[in-house]
Image: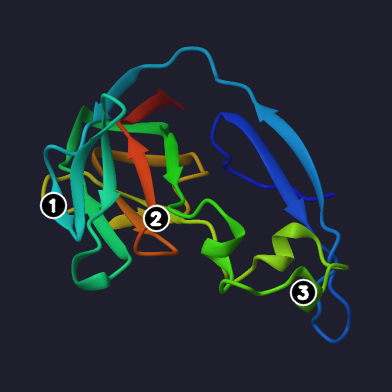
Amino acid sequence: MVRLVGVKPGTFTFWMSPKDNSGNYSDTPKSTTCTVIYPAGVDDDWSWDYSTGIHANTVNTNRLGTAALKCQHSGEILSGEWLSSEYDLGSVKEVTIWGDFLTDFSAGRNTCNDIWPSGELWSSKDLTKNWNTLLAGENAAAQVHGTLYWGDSSGSLDKEVSFFEILAADISGRYVQVKVQIVDPLSEANLYIYELNMTARDI
């Protein structure tokens, strides 16, 4: 059994793979899906659309008619960060807080010729490996990381928790803000994060 504390509401699929004494992971990982129920009695909701805050190699854009955050890829740098403005809960409160990181990924590559050099044969590949392993390092997925900051006074948010993209944090504070980091695998690929909806529930 694996116990994970603080996973935010929603449906998640977790993957695990055994590792031998030499540090090699199995090529056949197993997965399971579970749902964390949304609690009743939500006290505060708000959202950020990336038109405010501080951008560092990210940009507020429009994706399929919806506000979205993406890495700008300035100078071929494939990572970027956005720091939200502060949100005021109105008073110092003890709350459980989480955000919904709804994403969309544009890979930029559509065929095997886009992934491997033209003319490279299937016979040159180790076809005993699963598809995920076969493409590892060739066209990896993008990554998103969230960090939540909070504190009692504006401009002095001295507490933080990482993995906010999947966790719900129990905090005591009045002001909160979020930092989002995007890491794209390729210059022609983009991860888009839609409007970040936030929820706080009194503990």
- Disc 1 or disc 3, which is closer to the eye? 3
Apparent side of residue 32 relative to residue 83 in the rendered image (left or right): right
- Indicate the quadrant where residue 76 lies: bottom left
The secondary element bearing badge 2 is classed as loop
Apparent side of residue 37 relative to residue 56 in the rendered image (left or right): right
Q: Earlier in the sequence, mark 1 or mark 3?
A: 1
**203 or 161: nearer the viewer:** 161
**Is 82 rendered above or below residue 152?**
below
Mark 1, Cα crowd under 10 Å, few <14 / some 14-19 / many 20+, is some
Q: In the image, residue 186 lies at what x, y percent?
A: 41, 64
- Indicate the quadrant where residue 61 lies: top left
- Disc 1 or disc 2, which is closer to the eye? 2
**46 or 94: nearer the viewer:** 46
Residue receiving disc 2: 189
Tell me the number on the disc at residue 125.
3
Mark 3, Cα crowd under 10 Å, few <14 / some 14-19 / many 20+, is few
The reply to whether residue 157 is in sight is no
Give me the C-alpha separation between circle 1 and circle 3. 44 Å
Q: In the image, residue 148 lies at what x, y percent?
A: 34, 48
Name the amino acid, label 1: Ile
Apparent side of residue 17 relative to residue 199 in the rendered image (left or right): right
Residue ID at (46%, 56%): 143
Q: In the image, residue 93 lies at what x, y percent?
A: 31, 31
The reply to whether residue 202 is in sight is yes
The secondary element bearing badge 3 is classed as loop
Name the amino acid, label 2: Ala
Tell me the number on the disc at residue 54.
1
Q: Are marks 2 and 3 in contact (CB under 8 Å)?
A: no
Residue ID at (13%, 52%): 54
